[in-house]
Image: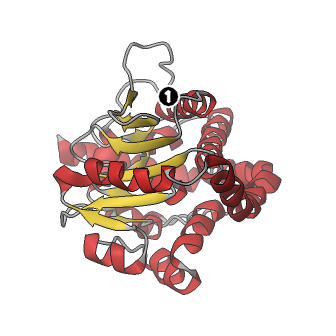
Amino acid sequence: ILTFTGAGLPDAAFWWKERATCCKVPARRFGSQRQLVVVEPSSTAGIAVLKLKNPPVNSFSLEFLTELVINLEKLENDKTFRGIIITSDCPKAFSAGIDLREICGKDPAYYTEYWKVLQDLWLRLYLSNLVLISAINGPCAAGGCLIPLTSDYRILADNPKCLIGLNETRLGISVPFWFKDSLVNIIGHHASEHALQLGLLFPPAEALQVGIVDKVAPKDQVQSTALSVMAQWLAIPDHARQLTKNMIRKPTADLLVKRRDTDIQNFVSFISRDSIQKSLQMYLAKLKQNKD
C-alpha cells in the first residue's frame, strides 16, 4: 500500500521537475503520429534495440506505457529475436518514471487503467523469455527503475549525473511491493532496507558496489558493452536458459498476479484522496511557477 505525505513533495529530486512538466497534452492521444518507442534490429543477428523516446525524460504516460507493452509483446512473438537491449533516445535521462500529471486530476477509472498497464509492463518484462539488457545511458529514478530491475543485466553510464535508485520515500511515497521484491532479489534484503527507506540514489561506483547494476561503462560505450554482454547470454541454449529464468522468477511474479486487483484498489484509493490530490496539485503548480 502506498503512503504519501505532502511534506515530502518539495524535496523531490531534480528530474521530477522534468517529469511533471513533460506532458502538456491530454494523456489519451492514442493514434497520434508521435512514436514513443523505437525498435531497431541490431547489426548483430537476433538482437533488437528498443529505444525509449518520450522526451524530455521518458516519463511514464499511459500512452507511452501502452506503446512499450505492445512493442515488447511483438518482440516476444517474433522468433527473429532472442534478446533486447533497452536504452534511452532522450539525452536527459534513461527514465524518470511515473508522470505526476497522470495521477493528478483524473477519475478512478483512469487510475485503474494506468496502474493495470504499469503492472502489465512489469510482468511482461519480468517474465520475458528474451534476454533483456538495460543500457542505462542517463539518470534512472523511482518508477524508471522498473525497466532495469526487471532486466537480466544492467549497464550504467559512468557519469556522476547518472544516478539510479528507488527514491520514492523522498516524495512521501512508498514503493509498490513488486518494485520492492525486484530490488530485494537483486541486491538483498539488508541493502534494500537501507535503499528503500532512505530513498537512496546511487552514483555509478556505488551502484556497482551495491549490485543494483552489473557493469559500469563510459557513456559512449554503454550500448557496445551491452552487445558484448548479450553475446555471452546468447551463447546459452534458449530453452535451458528460459526454463531456469522462469523457475527463479515465477514465484515473485505470482505474488503480483494473485494480488493484482487488491494492488490496484489500494493505489486508486490512495491516489484519489483529496489530501493527496491537493498535495499533487500544489506541487505541480509550484513546479510550473518555478519554470515560468
Residue 148 % position (x, y): 45, 56
Q: Can residue 262 be seen at all in this image of the molecule?
A: no
Q: Report crowding for label 1: few under 14, some 14 to 19, many 20 or more residues within 10 A (C-alpha).
A: some
| Residue at x-position 43% and y-position 14% | 32
Which amino acid is tagged 1? Glu
User: Which of the 4 quarters of the picture holds residue 66?
Assistant: top right
Which residue ends up furthest to the right in the rendered image?
Answer: 258
Q: How many marks?
A: 1
Tell me the residue at 68%/48% (across/down). 239
Picture coordinates of residue 127, whole percent (x, y)? 66, 50
Name the residue nearer the viewer: 115 or 38.
38
Where the C terminus falls, by quadrant? top left
Q: Which image quadrant: the N terminus? A: bottom right
Would you place residue 131 above or below residue 50 in this image?
A: below
Residue at (43%, 79%) from the top-left corner?
198
Q: Is residue 126 above or below residue 173?
A: above
SS category of the residue bearing label 1:
helix
Q: How is the image coloured?
A: secondary structure
Q: Is residue 57 visible?
A: yes
Query: In the current view of this chain or complex, which residue is farthest to the bottom?
Result: 190
Residue at 55% x, 34% y is 72
Q: Could you say where residue 82 lies in the image, as x and y percent from the top left?
A: 53, 40
Using the image as rendered, state which of residue 271 and residue 156 is in the foreground. 156
Q: Position of residue 165 (x, y in %)?
A: 40, 66
Query: Which residue is disc 1 drawn over?
Result: 63
Pick the front one: 105 or 188: 188
Is residue 34 shown above or below 78? above
